[in-house]
Amino acid sequence: MGILRQLLFGKYLLVTNTVSCGLMMAAGDVIQQRSEHWKKHCSDKKYFPSSVIAASPEDEKVTAISSTSAYGHDYMRTRNMTVVGLVQGPFHHCFYTILDKVLPGRNAKSVLKKTFLDQSIASPTCLGIFFVGLGILESRKIKEICEELKLKFGDTWKVDCCFWPPAQCINFIFVPLHYRVLYTNVMTMVYDIFLSYMKYDAHFE
Ligand SMILES: *[C@@H]1O[C@H](CO)[C@@H](O)[C@H](O)[C@H]1NC(C)=O
């Protein structure tokens, strides 16, 4: 009964968690899009100054255009990312509410068990929501979604497993109680930059 009551009546927290999941996803994608633009249009200027590449005045014009090309934000992409973030939110919230009931306390043993369950159940589920959700938004076929999962899921989960346990460990040991929500949100945003990269920018052989 206790779990049910908390799931139903911890509404305020549910809303807060869901909104912040969506916002962090949006922020992560905005940062990743900026960095993709920078990588494409600004970083190669350093290595290939236009005076070296341009052989004729016409070439020079082309180089100048491409290297100063204006930043156009893909709002649809950020919107789609926000949507999957908002879908992950309630799952996350319910998972941790149940986890805290099943494994109360902060002793080493229960923290270790929680971390294990987090990485083996919550992470794959959230990654599934992420890739499948975006695939559905792009109206892809089931076969294409499965292919993308096969390509990206394993590597993404591995990074997840290297990122979150240490991040949570630092959270428990070093971060003062009243900064933990902020800390978790910042780490989520950093991780979401990586998700955005895996979805839209990573190249696979
Ligand atoms: C976002 O979703 C819309 C439909 O909801 C789709 O048409 C579009 O291709 C998606 N954009 C990206 C970048 O995934």
Image (cartoon, rainbow, N blue to C red):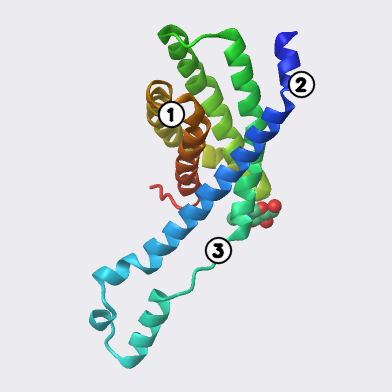
Q: Which residue is located at x 58 percent, y 28 percent?
A: 125
Q: Is mark 3 within 8 Å of ligand 1?
A: no
Q: Earlier in the sequence, mark 3 or mark 2?
A: 2
Q: Which residue is located at x 45 percent, y 53 percent?
A: 201
Instruction: Tell me the CA gap for discs 3 and 2.
Output: 38 Å
Figure disc tally: 3
Instruction: Tell me the CA gap for discs 2 and 1.
Output: 28 Å
From the top left corner, tell me how far across and down residue 87 is, in percent. Answer: 67, 36
Residue ID for mark 1:
164
In the displayed structure image, the side of residue 200 where residue 47 appears, left or right: left
Q: State whether residue 132 is above or below residue 113.
A: below
Q: Nearer the viewer, mark 3 or mark 2?
A: 2
Q: Is label 3 in a helix, a strand or a loop? A: loop
Find out whether the residues at labels 3 and 2 contact each other: C-beta distance under 8 Å: no
Amino acid type, label 2: Leu
Residue ID for mark 2:
8
The answer to which image quadrant residue 46 occupies is: bottom left
| Within-10-Å neighbours for mark 2: few <14, some 14–19, many 20+ | few
**Residue 143 appearing in the image:** no
From the top left corner, tell me how far across and down residue 55 is, in percent. Answer: 27, 87
Q: Nearer the viewer, mark 2 or mark 1?
A: 2
From the top left corner, tell me how far across and down residue 37 is, in percent. Answer: 44, 63
Q: State whether residue 109 is above or below residue 174.
A: above
Residue ID for mark 3:
73
| Within-10-Å neighbours for mark 1: few <14, some 14–19, many 20+ | some
From the top left corner, tell me how far across and down residue 169 is, in percent. Answer: 39, 23
Q: Ligand 1 shows up in which quadrant of the image?
A: bottom right
The answer to which image quadrant residue 6 occupies is: top right
In the displayed structure image, the side of residue 22 where residue 36 appears, left or right: left
